[in-house]
Image (cartoon, rainbow, N blue to C red):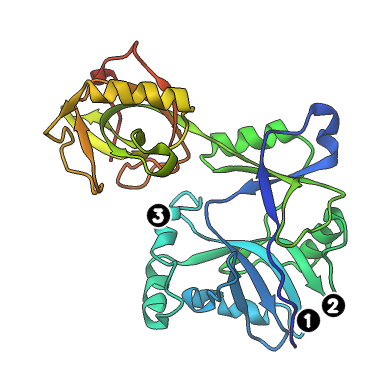
Amino acid sequence: MNLPLIAPMLATPGTLPPPAQDPHWAYETKHDGQRAVVYLPGDGTVLLRARSGEDITAAYPELGALGGALGGTPAVLDGEVLVLDEQGRGDFQLLQSRMGLAGSPARALRRADRAPAHLVLFDVLWLGGDRTGLAYTRRRGELEGLALDGPHWSTPAALVGHGELALRATRESGLEGVVCKRLDSVYEPGRRSRSWIKIRNLRTADVVVGGWVPGRGRLSGLPGAVLVGQRAGGRLRYVGSVGTGWSTAERVELARLLEASGTDHCPFDTVPRASEARWVLPRLVGEVRYSTRTRAGLLRQPSWSRLRPDLTPEESAADLP
């Protein structure tokens, strides 16, 4: 059967709905994975398309068995591909070893043994007809009625109301965050909608600035990003590049401070791979927000928060891998 191509609906960053509106929203766990629209034509096959529309089916051969899970019932489902860590949480670094292998089926099969994928399903877009115009509660009920729980896929429950509880639970469990979905919302293909609100749990860390990379375009003459590290075992370990979080005035002030601390020597114990990097004496301490750390200790999705003139570089020590 030729199923219609449906672009995934996108969530808007935001905050929890006000308490009075809380009962009108459902809360789902936000996962750190690869978005996938799943096409099940009812002939035993499965097709996975990424958010870009790219066919990524061959990258995840272990999901092929999902093609027969609904028998001859054709469907289009929305979900996210994860690779789980030892605690059962999505690990984006592990997932990266699986992404991009759609053109290399043999490699994908070998990687599947070492880092198996798991598909989390959270919406139904087509089931005997177009379901995108139905309310979230109706679509969610139909999805749960499919009872899709298998060796490499699942349909986690959603929580209606109790948004603060849901967000706190994800934070305490080390999960990425929550997605808030209005109970009466329709599915809006390809749109970033206010009917879905995503909230990411962000962590903070104190870091030492050890270098910077010149900006381009409107940021010409200013730092485009700073290279930061943390003290560990008497060394300054590189933990990432931070390029967002400043106002124009703050970036100008940072440029002045960096210019006054220039040096010819890289202060990190291992020189980062950063084109056009300029080094500074490791004296400036700042606070950054980030989502998670990689296994090597690098900060994922870091954003600058503020300078910390009250701290010395030695106080930026961290428990790094």
How far apart, in angstroms, are the residues tagged by discs 1 and 3? 35 Å
Q: Counting residues from the N terminus, which is met first, the one under dot 2 or under dot 3?
A: 3
- What amino acid type should be assigned to the residue bearing mark 1? Thr
Quarter of the image for the C terminus: give it. top left
Mark 2 and mark 1 residues within 8 Å of each other at the beta carbon = yes
Residue 91 point in image, percent of width and height: 45, 53
Determine which residue is flagged by label 2: 128
* Residue 307 drawn above or below residue 169: above
**Residue 243 occupies quadrant:** top left
Q: Earlier in the sequence, mark 1 or mark 3?
A: 1
- Tell me the number on the disc at residue 93: 3
Residue behind mark 1: 73
Which residue lies at the image location 23% right of the left edge and 41% below the top edge? 277
Q: Name the foreground residue: 29 vs 52.
A: 52
- Residue 158 makes an appearance in the image: no
Name the amino acid type tagged 3: Gln
